[in-house]
Amino acid sequence: MEPTYFNEMYQNGGVRSPYRHLENWTAEMPAELRSLKQAEAEALFRRIGITFAVYGEGGDPDRLIPFDMFPRVFTAAEWARLERGIKQRARALNAFLVDVYGRGEIVRAGRIPARLVYQNEAYEKAVAGFVPPRGVYSHIVGIDLVRTGPDEFFVLEDNCRTPSGVSYMLENREIMMRMFPALFRENRIQPVDRYPELLRRTLQSVAPAKCDREPVVVILTPGHFNSAYYEHSFLADLMGVELVEGQDLFVEGEFVYMRTTEGPKKVDVIYRRIDDAFLDPLCFRPDSALGVPGLMDVYRSGGVTICSAPGAGVADDKAIYTFVPEMIRFYLGETPILQNVPTWQCGKPEDLKHVLAHLGELVVKEVHGSGGYGMLVGPRSTQEQIARFAERILADPANYIAQPTLALSTVPTFVEEGIAPRHVDLRPYCLVGERVELVPGGLTRVALKEGSLVVNSSQGGGVKDTWVLAE
Amino acid sequence: MILTVLHLTTYRYETPVRGVVQSHRLTPSQFDGQKTLSWRVEVEGGQRGGGFRDGAGDWVQGYSVRGPVSELVVRVAGEVETFDLAGMLKGHRETVPPEAYLRETAATRPDAALAELGREASAGARDPLDAAHRISAAVAEAIAYAPGATHAHTTAAEALAQGEGVCQDHAHALIAAARAQGTPARYVSGYLMADVAELPHEAAHAWAELHIAGLGWVGFDAANRCCPDGRFIRLGSGFDARDAAPIRGIARGPGSESLDVTVAIQAVQQ
Amino acid sequence: MLSRTADNLYWITRYMERAETMARLLDVGGRMALLPSTGEGFHSEWESLLQASGTAEGFARKYGDPVQRNIESYFFFDLDNPSSIASCITRARENARIVRGALTTQVWDTLNGAFQEIRALERRPRSELDLSSLTDWTMRHSALLRGAIDGTQLRKDGWDFLKLGYYLERADNTARLIDVKYYVLLPGVEFVGSGLDNYQWTTLLRAMSAQRAFHWAYGGEISARKIAHFLILNIQSPRSLRSSVEGMTEHLDRLARGYQRSSAAQSKSRALLAELAELEVKDIFDEGLHEFLTRFIGEVAALATLIHDTYLSGDQA
């Protein structure tokens, strides 16, 4: 039986309050105007060159992610609760990171198994014993959320390394404001354009102790062949900082410098968009040409700050995810505001038994997978597909987790036939530095295929502007 | 015992390079088994970079040299008083928990033969310490000391299959076999004063440490069929040889480099 | 700015100037091919053109005999030829993409447009494309880009690096074209002053879009000395060596002022300009035109190295 989905606009035959102005808007928009506007939006996206795959999904770098003009709307009250929950989670994740690279109290207390932390691929021995400035490891925490009811939100996963997609949040808004200024007059929508400024301030606030002036921030990109290069240059531009590659930086003495036409210029904070393994060939992969030799020594001796800190990934592993509510209780002494999705670890025999018996109802994912690949959506799979996936799980149970199929909420979406409900998720971007900040908005991804629950752009997903209304 | 060390590493660059960056783990560990009386690391024309004690308790020191560089000498000289603790690493402070050293690396990945060696050797052992001694002995039996038979990138599995190797191979094989048995193990680099004729003469030396419940980290030198004693100076540790290398460095520029290392360790007459 | 950014800007314009020179060479070749063959020294004018552009070997390996259609393909479309117009534009556009943020929308659109068009041209049947339409196309896009740069880029260091690339490449290319005219194109010394000689000069002038300007400035018969003066020393001639060096000096001076630090590149450029300002045609011919040009090309290369070391490599102290 198909579950019933929470429609964010229509409930009980009426329109929910945050969407009330949108009903007229669509009613008054003839089909021709709509397709004209849609074409205009696409042309704008192409022109600015925002053609990259979100969330490291790879694929054609010139592919445009479909933009749906129908916005997704939250009330101020709804957002206030989300904001508290997101910030709480971001603080707990950072407390966890400081702990596991320090004394490991949470492991000693028996709340998280040592194996999951210390034998984790993402645990970096190289940063053990180090507390980064202000005790922050993950400065930009992307938390993927889904909604299943008026007050029901679940966290799907945390992204503590370098969550991407924030340029969509900003560009989607920019384009909506350009195309439908009237909408922004009727609805009191909280702005998101402070994000680059907040990001810059966040990064500057974690400058190392040895920095005695206005901190110089750079963004470190793997280069223009990277699928997220557009986002890197976009953010650098909006923040007014240099976009550098590894070859632009070098270590001399206790500091890191960038090569400029006016000579070496000291760098204090590096917002890196490359993986740990490539940061420093002296410390990590010796064959990396993307990094900066000697960077880790400068980092650990307090000459530069790397954001996110190397090793931050140990907090966003799918196996660690299960323990985030525990972290919130352990470090903050608070009750988790946002729920985790109930998760079965196939590595545990009793969980594995349950999973294998209920494959038809569950979503099964690889622990380290991303982009919606290597997963099984039970209710949408054939018996044969389920049987084949069961074999894969049995071959390496510890590599899989399972979750119930969530009844993802829907938002009206422009489709060929007119307007129809489509499933959505949400990724807000929480900034952690001297303060914990969250701009009112995020990236809403939408599954454009009818009935689909997979919002990944590589599998037919699109994006929407996300509104948070003022009080 | 008081040991003096003189360790010279000379890099020669075919074409002068534009700069060199190095990361050193060249300072004696701080633990009850050794007391540093004097110690100096000099890099000709180099600028001292950041230094810090890492999570494994080792002192790491960065250096950079501005180009053009055609020759670079790293000179280590000092005096260390050592005490025989039967291989135990007493009084060593570190943050990284032993569990972290169960992770395998390319050089220490156990193949079936290594796992089998570990299993067979430890079968019937009285306790974990006994098992560790037995695995170390088995590695010494299985890999004959033969300089030149292996190279810097030989893996534990390859060395075992070949049946020959040097201290690096012994240490890698021991680590791999121990980890396969669920015993945390790591690679240690340091110096050895080898004045006994039948011992292999490798002054720049490496061995393994295994974590034994109740005792902590204990050193095993399979190459010399012993545990580290007063003749050993410990510098630092890592998952494998690369991770524990005393000098890691990169030169910026094309062309090949050649390396020349001399180490002299002597006991001070008392 | 980042040294790598400056480097990319500088190479955008070097590649675009090079593309333009290639188009000019193609034009020269096309006109000379209309001449009755001299039958001496060279298989054909096309052969000498390949020699002139330094691409003879690569061409021979790929196509064998120099037939006009193949030459056109090789000079215009062939990505295996690093100096082909398509190669130059592709690389210029790639450099621009890397430093997209340092360029105005107009500059980017112009370059990106040229790149997209050349891909479209490639798909068209070659029979629809005659030589002059291809060379005209190149000149037009080159001019558009130059206009977009001058009209829209902020007058900051980035602009100076863009301009430096143009002037440096032009100084080098003009010197090579003159040299090629005398020492490659002409079958033998006995042809100096001959009808062929004069025809070649005229063609060269026309290829450099300078025929009218030349007649305005000098009038009368074409002579080697007049041409040498026009292409080397005349400050009114936009492609002359002196104008090119003047351009380089101006932008190196601006950079030194902006960065409040004089540079070896600036001194070198100034010295070269001073020498050209003092020079008379007689001096050049006394030294020997070829010898002079060879020396000049060497000086420009040395200047390029200094610019690289000072600003583009990021290695200076």
Image: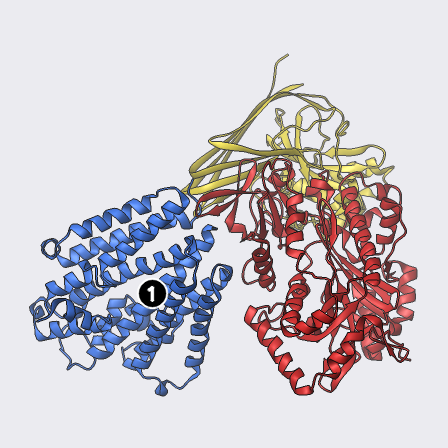
- In this figure, which residue is indicated by the disc labeled 1? C17
Tell me what hue chain C is rendered in: blue
Q: Is residue A273 above or below residue A37?
A: above
- Residue B138 point in image, percent of width and height: 74, 41
The correct choice, above or below, for A392 with respect to B7 in the image is: below
Find chain A in the image and tell me its colour: red
Please report the residue visible at 62 percent of the width from the left and 82 percent of the height from the top: A36
Q: Between residues C218 and A329, which one lies in front from this camera angle? A: C218
Image quadrant in which you'd find residue A12: bottom right
Quarter holding the C terminus of chain C?
top left
Q: Quadrant of residue B189?
A: top right
Mark 1 residue crowding within 10 angstroms, few (<14) / some (14–19) / many (20+): many
Residue found 61% across the figure and 80% down from its top: A39
- Of B138 and A411, which appears nearest the observer? A411
Asked if residue B38 lies left or right of residue B42, the reply is right
Q: Where is residue C172 in the image (x, y as percent from the top left)?
A: 27, 59
User: In the figure, what tint was chain B given?
Assistant: yellow
Secondary element under disc 1, as helix, strand or loop, is helix
